[in-house]
Amino acid sequence: MKKMTEQHLINAFGGESQAHMRYLHFANQAEKENYTNVARLFRAISHAEYVHAGDHYKALKHLNGGFVANSMAAFGPGDTLKNLQLAIDGETFEIEEMYPVYIEVAKFQEEKLAQRSFEWSYATEKLHKQLFEKAFDAVNAGNDVELGPVHICEVCGYTLEGEAPDRCPVCGAVKEKFTGFR
């Protein structure tokens, strides 16, 4: 694998891993503030980030040893409203800066496995941002978010509110490959 794409995969793995853990901590804070649906949303999206990290990690199976991951990470957790803003900021970075560049470099370097992993994450991060914005607006108004079941594709991390589709629109996985957060 070409070194630039390889480093982007390492960085993406680090960023998604950190988002996974950060969102679990944010879920605990939301529960303390009695935002049970926001907590459920954080847990669901945390799981999607875990799937993304796993996809990036699998694409790095050729490596052996320790490597430094340079990842954008949001620090300074606070109340649920602040944590939602940190989540929105992180998703925005991935949508506007990180994944578009990583995808183009992987295309240029003809690294198809990396390109697919980046594209799957990129498609899903847009949905995460929308869900976090919905939750932010509700909490900003003093309410828990109105939220139906959230489903996560175990193959690509695709996230949706509502029932799982027959096939994942991102990777084509069957309905049985979705995990529900109710």
Image: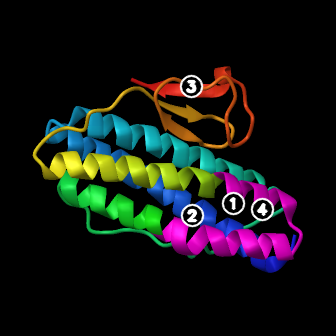
In the picture of the structure, the residue carrying the numbered disc 1 is 118
Amino acid type, mark 1: Phe
The tag earlier along the polypeptide, 4 or 3, is 4
Q: Secondary structure at mark 1?
A: helix
Q: Position of residue 152 (x, y in %)?
A: 55, 35
Magenta-span inclusion, residue 123: no
In the picture of the structure, the residue carrying the numbered disc 3 is 164
Amino acid type, mark 2: Gly
Q: Does residue 112 appear left or right of residue 97 in this picture?
A: right
In the picture of the structure, the residue carrying the numbered disc 2 is 14
Which residues lie in the magenta part?
Answer: 93-120
**CA separation, marks 3 and 1?**
22 Å
Residue at 25% across / 38% down in the picture?
Answer: 145
**Total numbered labels placed on residues in the image:** 4
Q: Main secondary structure of the magenta part?
A: helix
**CA separation, marks 4 and 3?**
25 Å
In the picture of the structure, the residue carrying the numbered disc 4 is 115
The tag earlier along the polypeptide, 1 or 2, is 2
Q: Position of residue 105 (x, y in %)?
A: 77, 76
Mark 1 vs 2: CB contact within 8 A: no
Q: Does residue 70 appear left or right of residue 73 in this picture?
A: right
Amino acid type, mark 3: Ala
Pick out the residue farthest to the bottom: 4
The tag earlier along the polypeptide, 3 or 2, is 2
Labels 3, 2: front one: 3
